[in-house]
Image: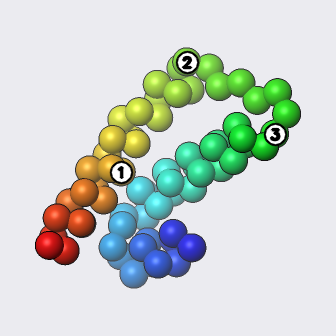
Amino acid sequence: MFGLHFVKPGIITAESGDFYTIIFDLRHSGDYDDFIVFSKEEVVSLLQPAKDLVAEIEEILSKQE
């Protein structure tokens, strides 16, 4: 639904939408799959793209005010 409502209309970039899909799937796996362990390197590699996504969303929200 994120892609349908935010990426497809161009509110969020396709790159950010792809990243959101990746982290959503990782969170789902971490919550529901058996014996999932994320390495420190995997998690650290997601930090900057996550910060970028949050910044993009904050920018969109600031324009709504």
* Count of numbered circles in the view: 3
Please state which of residues 28 and 56 is positioned toward the viewer in this rendering.
28
The quarter of the picture where residue 11 lies is bottom left
Q: Residue at x 78, y 43 (%)?
A: 32
Mark closest to the chain's N terminus, 3 or 2: 3
Pointer 2 with pointer 1, Cβ within 8 A: no
Mark closest to the chain's N terminus, 1 or 3: 3
Q: Residue at x 56, y 26 (%)?
A: 42
Q: Please state which of the two labelled residues, at mark 3 or mark 2, is closer to the viewer.
A: 3
Pointer 1 with pointer 3, Cβ within 8 A: no
Q: Residues within 10 Å of mark 3 (few under 14, many from 20)?
A: few
Q: Which mark, residue 40?
A: 2
In the rendered structure, which amino acid carries the disc numbered 2?
A: Lys
Q: Residue at x 56, y 46 (%)?
A: 23
Mark closest to the chain's N terminus, 2 or 1: 2
Q: Residue at x 76, y 29 (%)?
A: 36
Residue 45 in the figure: left or right of residue 11: right
Give percent across and percent down for residue 38.
65, 25
Return the residue at label 3.
33
Q: Residues within 10 Å of mark 1 (few under 14, many from 20)?
A: some
Return the residue at label 1.
53
Q: Please state which of the two labelled residues, at mark 1 or mark 3, is closer to the viewer.
A: 3
Vertical relation: 22 (above or below) 12? above
Give percent across and percent down for residue 15.
42, 57
Q: CA distance from mark 2 to mark 1?
A: 20 Å
Q: CA distance from mark 3 to mark 2?
A: 19 Å
Vertical relation: 39 (above or below) 11? above
In the rendered structure, which amino acid carries the disc numbered 3?
A: Asp
Say which element carries label 1.
helix
